[in-house]
Image (tube, rainbow, N blue to C red):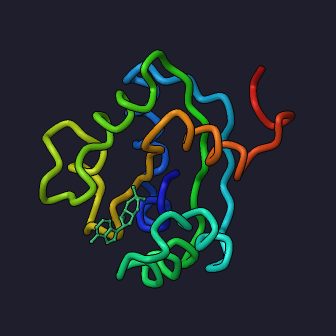
Amino acid sequence: MIKPDAFKDGHSGGILKMIEEAGFKIVALKATQLSAAVAGKFYAVHQERPFYNDLCNYMSSGPIIAAILEKDNAVADFRKLIGATNPADAEEGTIRKKYAKSIEANAVHGSDSDENAAIEGSFFFSEFERVQ
Ligand code: CMP
């Protein structure tokens, strides 16, 4: 997902370029805006965390881009490409180093396991919205 700050600041194209240049194939893509309730469902695993409400408000504050990406070893390689959650810790050459503003407005989200990638992909896209 490209988060509201990066979308609003016009970085979607730059981020998608970094993703494609890193060898990921885009198999589904859409711009949309989440309600706070839908953002809450997406981030339900974090509902006990102190930042949960702020995160849901932030993620519903403007449009986002959702995408499904394919690549060998996609989850681990995408996490490497996006960099650390806190941009202060993100390495040079990562998306968050280049585009993130804070731990919350950190430009992008990536799934943390193959299982969650399948769940999160189905959250945004039907079978017919994906390149087969
Ligand atoms: P993301 O990869 O989208 O997964 C959960 C998000 O919670 C995370 O990126 C951050 O943007 C956000 N977040 C806000 N505060 C924190 C925090 N203190 N620790 C971890 N994640 C946080």
Q: Residue, x 66% and y 41% (percent of image)?
A: 29
The quarter holding residue 117 reads: top right
**What percent of the width, then of the height, locates residue 95?**
30, 44
The quarter holding residue 63 reads: bottom right
Position of 7 with respect to 121 (left or right) is: left
Q: Residue, x 47% and y 77% (percent of image)?
A: 58
Ligand 1 quadrant? bottom left
Extreme residue in the right direction? 128
Q: Residue, x 48% and y 24% (percent of image)?
A: 24
Q: Residue, x 72% and y 45% (percent of image)?
A: 122
Q: Nearer the viewer, residue 32 or 110?
A: 110
**What percent of the width, then of the height, locates residue 13?**
48, 44
**What percent of the width, then of the height, locates residue 18?**
38, 33
- Point out the image quarter for the C terminus: top right
Extreme residue in the top direction? 72
62 over 130 or under it: above or below? below
Extreme residue in the front direction? 48
Position of 80 with respect to 65 (left or right) is: left
40 over 122 or under it: above or below? below
- Number of numbered callouts drawn: 0
**What percent of the width, then of the height, locates residue 112?**
43, 43
Position of 95 with respect to 53 (left or right) is: left
Position of 115 with respect to 127 (left or right) is: left
Q: Nearer the viewer, residue 93 or 104?
A: 104
